[in-house]
């Protein structure tokens, strides 16, 4: 049994009179201690997929889910909300890009870490403080007792992200979802934070789903990759195969747009022609067809399924492209 197994996930939002389907038939699995990357341009549905796993949207009016999200064999989509509170934080933790807004400006770092420790570990007073200092240490923060007394504004961006990671680790999650955790940070700090996350993955055998639009980071850190386009997975493969033999024109375009000079931030991340279409204007046929250099007639007619590549030996390498194998 996989730690997390998602089957045909669909997430729809009601916006005014319309309903848009942001996620459409997404399936993937994450094993214990595994490191999986989810990549794709901005607006492809990466965050919505992750927020759906934790059921963070307002279910009374806004959102409708379909499919299954098995976590340790239990379908999260059929749990009562009160059981989801136990899953969030205790089993599955999430860190976001924006660590500054995630921390409360009027409380000290100690207040914010011990809140979680008290809740999840049942510690209080001195013991909670010591546990908080331990978590900071684990997150690579030196002089943790001094940091505990500080407020978020007194810390740098990288330090705040470490604090967020410390908070999310304080309940010993089995799965960490890191949603573009380093996008707001400069390159050197980015590398340190990624190193920290991967170090924790090894030390704690904590599975990680890393969301990023930076393929260079994926190559260095993850073993399995999912490529998402307009609410669907278009390719999945072991990371090394994804880079050595991509089987979808979208993946190829993403790889080609990795900046060559390391350490320099590109002005525009991707040089793929055109933009991701809006959800109320999803193309008939292959969703990538309007932007794809290889488009032929059938691509505009019918959306291909995500299937194993016939020429590959590894049956796990899948692509959603009529012309996969010609690339
Ligand atoms: N709460 C929402 N209501 C309606 N549409 C949304 C909502 N959240 C996200 N979307 C739409 O879903 C799509 C995927 O967004 P998102 O998952 O945030 O992309 P990304 O891959 O950049 O994380 C986008 O078209 C976005 O506009
Ligand atoms: Mg996002």
Image: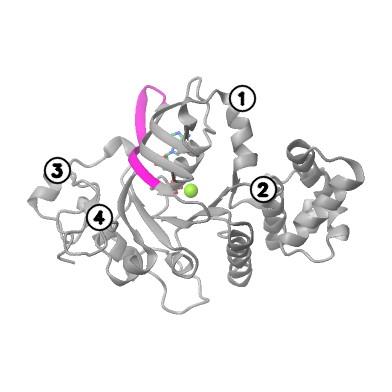
Give the mark nearest the N terminus, 4 or 3: 3
Q: Give the distance between the C-alpha atoms of the residues marked 3 and 1, in whole angstroms.
A: 42 Å
**Residue 319 shows which numbered tag?**
4
Q: Give the distance between the C-alpha atoms of the residues marked 2 and 1, in whole angstroms.
A: 20 Å
Give the mark nearest the N terminus, 2 or 1: 1
The N terminus is located in which quarter? top left
Q: Give the distance between the C-alpha atoms of the residues marked 2 and 3, in whole angstroms.
A: 45 Å
Please, which residue is most extreme toward the right here? Answer: 126
Q: Position of residue 210 (x, y in %)?
A: 50, 55
Q: Give the distance between the C-alpha atoms of the residues marked 1 and 4, in whole angstroms.
A: 38 Å
Name the residue at 35% across, 33% down. Answer: 21
Of tags 4 and 2, the one toward the viewer is 2
Q: Nearer the viewer, residue 298 or 116?
A: 116
Magenta segment's dominant SS is strand
Check disc 2 and report the residue beneath it: 172
Give the mark nearest the N terminus, 2 or 3: 2
Colouring used for the render: one colour
Q: Are marks 1 and 4 in contact (CB under 8 Å)?
A: no
Check disc 1 and report the residue beneath it: 82
Res 306 seen here: yes
Please, which residue is most extreme toward the bottom here? Answer: 261
């Amino acid at each position: 049994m996989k730690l997390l197994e998602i089957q045909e996930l669909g997430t729809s939002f009601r916006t005014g009179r319309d309903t848009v389907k942001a996620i459409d038939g997404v399936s993937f699995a994450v094993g214990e201690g595994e490191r999986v990357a989810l990549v794709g341009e901005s607006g492809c549905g990466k965050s919505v997929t992750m927020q759906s796993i934790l059921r963070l949207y307002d279910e009374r009016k806004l959102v409708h889910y379909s499919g299954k999200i098995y976590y340790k064999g239990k379908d999260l989509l059929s749990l009562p909300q009160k059981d989801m509170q136990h899953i969030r934080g205790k089993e599955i933790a999430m860190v976001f890009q924006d660590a500054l807004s995630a921390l409360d400006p009027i409380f000290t770092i100690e207040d914010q870490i011990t809140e979680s420790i008290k809740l999840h570990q049942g510690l209080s007073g001195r013991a909670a403080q010591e546990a908080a200092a331990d978590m900071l240490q684990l997150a690579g923060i030196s002089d943790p007792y001094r940091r505990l007394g500080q407020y978020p504004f007194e810390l740098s961006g990288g330090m705040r992200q470490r604090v967020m990671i410390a908070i999310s680790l304080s309940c010993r999650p089995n799965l960490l979802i890191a949603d573009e955790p380093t996008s707001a940070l400069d390159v050197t700090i980015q590398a340190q934070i990624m190193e920290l996350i991967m170090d924790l993955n090894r030390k704690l055998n904590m599975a990680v789903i890393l969301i990023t639009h930076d393929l260079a980071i994926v190559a260095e850190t993850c073993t399995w990759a999912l490529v998402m386009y307009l609410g669907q997975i278009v390719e999945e493969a072991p990371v090394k195969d994804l880079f050595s033999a991509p089987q979808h024109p979208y993946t190829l375009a993403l790889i080609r747009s990795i900046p060559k000079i390391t350490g320099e931030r590109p002005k525009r991340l991707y040089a793929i022609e055109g933009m991701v279409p809006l959800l109320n204007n999803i193309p008939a046929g292959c969703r990538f067809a309007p932007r794809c250099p290889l488009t032929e007639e059938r691509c505009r007619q019918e959306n291909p399924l995500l299937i194993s590549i016939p020429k590959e030996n590894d049956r796990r390498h899948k692509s959603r492209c009529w012309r996969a194998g010609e690339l």
